[in-house]
Image (cartoon, helix red, strand yellow):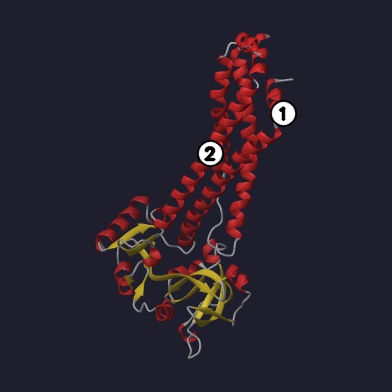
Amino acid sequence: MTLTGIAALNLTHRPWRTGLTLLGVVLAIAAYVALLGLVKGIEGTLVESFSSRGTDVVLTEAGAADVLSSVVPVGLVDEVAQVEGVAAAAPELGRMTTVGENTTSFIIGWPADAFGMRAMEIVEGRFPLPEDRTETVAGGITLGTRLAERLDVGVGDLVEVFATDFVVTGLYTSEGVMAMNGALTLIEDMQAQTYRDGQATSIVVQLSDDLSPVERDAAIARLSERFPDLSVDPTETLVQEYSNLRIATILAWVVSTVAVASAALAVLNTMAMAVNERRGEIAILGAVGWPRGRIVRLLMLEGAWLTIAGSGLGILVGIAVAWIVAWSPQVEGFVEPVIDGTLLIRAVAIGLGIGLIGAYVPAIRAASEDPASILRGK
């Protein structure tokens, strides 16, 4: 039997201890994969929500914690549009609110001629118009197809938004996950219902397509110089500086680090106890001619076997947990986990590192003892 086979067989001699340690590794790797996969998914979803509607730069209130708490005067749009390098600009009023009975969604208010409308493909009906507003209806609203499916509504139906009725004028599709689960309405109708007359949460900008990277940076610099009281950010930068995302990232790293450290201690404890119980067996191996290095490799292979198996199971559990969270009613439509090859390679490397480090100290200690002394002590 090979050294690897002997290591695997040794783990089966203590099934309960091996199983519990394996469970610790599984939970640690699952936490790492699920948490970081969800955080990466949130970041990707936010970037996609802007890029899918053609937004290159976002102007928000300087010092605002996030886009939704920002307040920007709508009247600045014409000045923004005149800056060299800007192809189009539009005010945007965004709110996270309940649509229908219990479905939370992201609602965007735009002018009827906003450039973002061109990025949305109407599959049924049309975008809202001012004439949709009547004495009994606050205005028109166009739903993403996935949101319409979740609400089980279609064109002509009424949905309750901001505690009042809006008529569904159309359904659209888009590349963005959040956009597909969101809704569009006219900014003036949204302002009336949210008591934000003349206000937007941001001014979104589309730069000219023919600009080089240097020219794009120059256009952004001109916007910053022209509007010093506003925060001017490319969409990627805005997402990276989003306070809630940074908090989620920190929490994900803290929780996964604690889980990994706990798993490493569990492996160390298991290997130390196993080595202590097998001092006689290890002494016999040394007495019959096994070199010290081979004994160390055997014990480290046991740790590696344990954590490689735990890493594989942990990755599967982590992927399942991440998608269960993403499909939950409270989160659905806002995030899709991003679990790529880089994340999986890191998870396996962490698991293997746990096993090798956890087994190294007990292995060195065991191999350093004098076989004759141990055997005489028996």
Q: Which residue is mark 2?
A: 262
Mark-to-mark CA distance, 1 and 2: 24 Å
Q: Amino acid at mark 1?
A: His
The answer to whether residue 297 is above or below residue 246 is above
Q: Quadrant of residue 208?
A: bottom left
In front of the other: 74 or 30: 30
- For image coordinates 66% across by 16% down, the residue present is 280
Q: Which quadrant, please, contains the C terminus?
A: top right
Q: Which residue is mark 1?
A: 13
Q: Position of residue 48 (x, y in %)?
A: 49, 58
Left or right: 12 as drawn, with respect to 23 = right
Q: Residues within 10 Å of mark 1 (few under 14, many from 20)?
A: few
Q: Position of residue 194 (x, y in %)?
A: 41, 77
The answer to whether residue 15 is above or below residue 92 is above
The answer to whether residue 68 is above or below residue 313 is below
- For image coordinates 50% across by 58% down, the residue present is 45
Determine whether label 1 and label 2 are within 8 Å by CB. Answer: no
Q: Residues within 10 Å of mark 2 (few under 14, many from 20)?
A: some
Q: Position of residue 325 (x, y in %)?
A: 58, 57
Left or right: 94 as drawn, with respect to 278 = left
The answer to whether residue 39 is above or below residue 20 is below
Visible in this render: residue 234?
A: yes
Q: Quadrant of residue 267?
A: top right
Q: Which quadrant, please, contains the N terminus?
A: top right
SS under mark 2: helix
Q: Of label 1 and label 2, which has the lower sequence position?
A: 1
Q: Amino acid at mark 2?
A: Ser
